[in-house]
Image: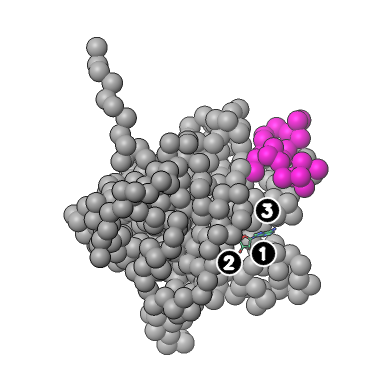
Amino acid sequence: MTRTDTTSTSPRHLCVMNAGSSSLKFGVYLPDEGLKLRMSGAVEGIGGAARLRIVAAGGQETHTGQHTVPDHAAALRVLEGLEDGPLARGSLMAFGHRVVHGGAEHDAPVRVDEEALRRIEALSSLAPLHNPPAVAVIRELMRLFPDIPQVACFDTAFHRSHPAVADRFAIPDALYQEGVRRYGFHGLSYEFIAGALGEDAPEIALGRVVVAHLGSGASMCALAGGRSVDSSMGFTALDGLPMGTRSGSLDAGVILWLQQQKHWSVDQVEEFLYQDCGLKGLSGVSNDMRELLASTAPLAHLAVEYFVYHVARMAGALAASMGGIDGFVFTAGIGERSPEIRARVLRRLSWLGFSIDEAANRNGGPKLTRPDSRLPAYVIPTDEELVIARHTQALVQPRPATALV
Ligand code: ADP
C-alpha cells in the first residue's frame, strides 16, 4: 500500500537508517534547520519479539513497545504505522542508508535505483552478515515509498584512497581482481572525524593522524591530510584489533587447524570468529569493556591489557604507514567513554611523544595531552548518522551549478 499525505504540518525531514543483523536504528534530521536531529530510535531483537524505542531530540521517550517482528521489512511496517514516527508521510524528503560494504567500485555515496540496488545486492557475497539487512530495508522502502529518493552510504568508500600496498594481500592478482582486497570499514566514522578535525583539533587537521574507533567493533585509520591511507580492517570487519566478540587479526593457520583437527564446519568457524572471540572469548567474562574493567578475574585483566596492547601496536604500524605521526584521536563507545583505556593506550605511546594530561582525560578532554606534550591526542565523539544525513541531503538537493566565467 502506498499513500501520499499532503496535509502534514511537520517540517521536511530526512530519515537515516542503519540496519544491523537484528536491529534497525534510525534518525530523523531537519534539512531546513541545519540538519538538526529531530528524533532517533531503534527496533532491536528483529527475528522475534522486538523492542521499539524512539527518543525526541530533547531526550524524552515518545514511543516504546514490544512487537513480533520476523524481519526488517516487518520492522518498517511497525514504524510506518506510528503517528509522528520516522516514516511520517508528507514531510518525508529522502532516506539515507548505512551500507557496510560498497566493494571496490563505490568511492562515494550513490542514489539508489533498481540498478544500483542490484549492484549493492551483488556485494552481499563479500559481506554476507552485513549487507543483506540494508538491502532488505531499501527494497521494502522502495515498495512502501516509491517516490521518495534513497541514498546508500558505504563504510568502505572513505578508504578507496589507499595506495596499492595497503589495498592488497600477498595473494595472486586474479583473486584481487575478484574482489579479495583490504577494503577497510568504519569509513563513515572516519569521514566525520576528518571533517571535525578542522574545528576540534586544527593544528593536526592537515597532518598525519591516527584515529582509533573503539566500539564493540573496533578499528583504526591512518589519516593523512584528511584522507584515509591505511586501516586496521581488511577484507571483512574481522581483521585488525580484537573487538567485543570478534577475534581481530588471526593467523590463517588457526582456521585450517580448527577445520583439520577439530573438524569444524564453515558455519561453526564463522560463528566462532564473529561471536565467540575477542574480549568475550579471551576473558570468558564479557564482551563489554565496562564489565571487564570492573572484574577481578585474571583473564578479564588479560583481555583489557591485550586490547590496549594491540591498539598501541596498531598506532605504531599506522604511524609507519604515514612516515610519522602528528596526532591521535579516540572515538566511539570505548574511546569516548573510557578514560582508563585512553590513559593506558597513551602511556604505551609515550615513546612517540604523547604526555597525557590525567585531569583533562578524566574530564573527557577534548584535548588529552599536556601543553608540553610533543604530540597532541584528542577525544572526538563520532556521528556516522550525521555524515549519512549530509550525503543524503547533498544527493537529493544538489546545489545549483555555479556558472563558469
Ligand atoms: P557499536 O560498535 O555497537 O556502535 P559503541 O561505539 O556504542 O558500539 O561501543 C559500545 C561499547 O563501548 C560497549 O560494548 C562497551 O564495551 C563500551 N563502553 C561504553 N561505555 C563505556 C564506558 N563508560 N567504559 C568503558 N567502555 C564503555
Q: Quadrant of the C terminus?
A: top left
- Horizontal side, residue 217 vs residue 165: left or right: right
Lower position in the chain sequence, tag 2 or tag 3: 2
Extreme-front residue of the structure = 7
Image quadrant where residue 283 sits: bottom right
Question: Is 84 in front, or is 145?
Answer: 84
Q: Element under label 2?
A: loop
Can you say whether 22 is above or below 143 in the image? below
Within 8 Å: ligand 1 and the Cβ of disc 3? yes
Lower position in the chain sequence, tag 3 or tag 1: 1
Residue beneath label 2, please? 244
**Visible in this render: residue 405?**
yes
Within 8 Å: ligand 1 and the Cβ of disc 2? yes
Within 8 Å: ligand 1 and the Cβ of disc 1? yes
Alpha carbons under labels 3 and 1: distance apart? 10 Å
Residues tagged 1 and 2 counted as in contact (Cβ below 8 A): yes
Q: Nearer the viewer, mark 2 or mark 3?
A: 3
Residue beneath label 1, please? 289
Question: Is 79 in front, or is 125?
Answer: 79
Alpha carbons under labels 2 and 3: distance apart? 15 Å
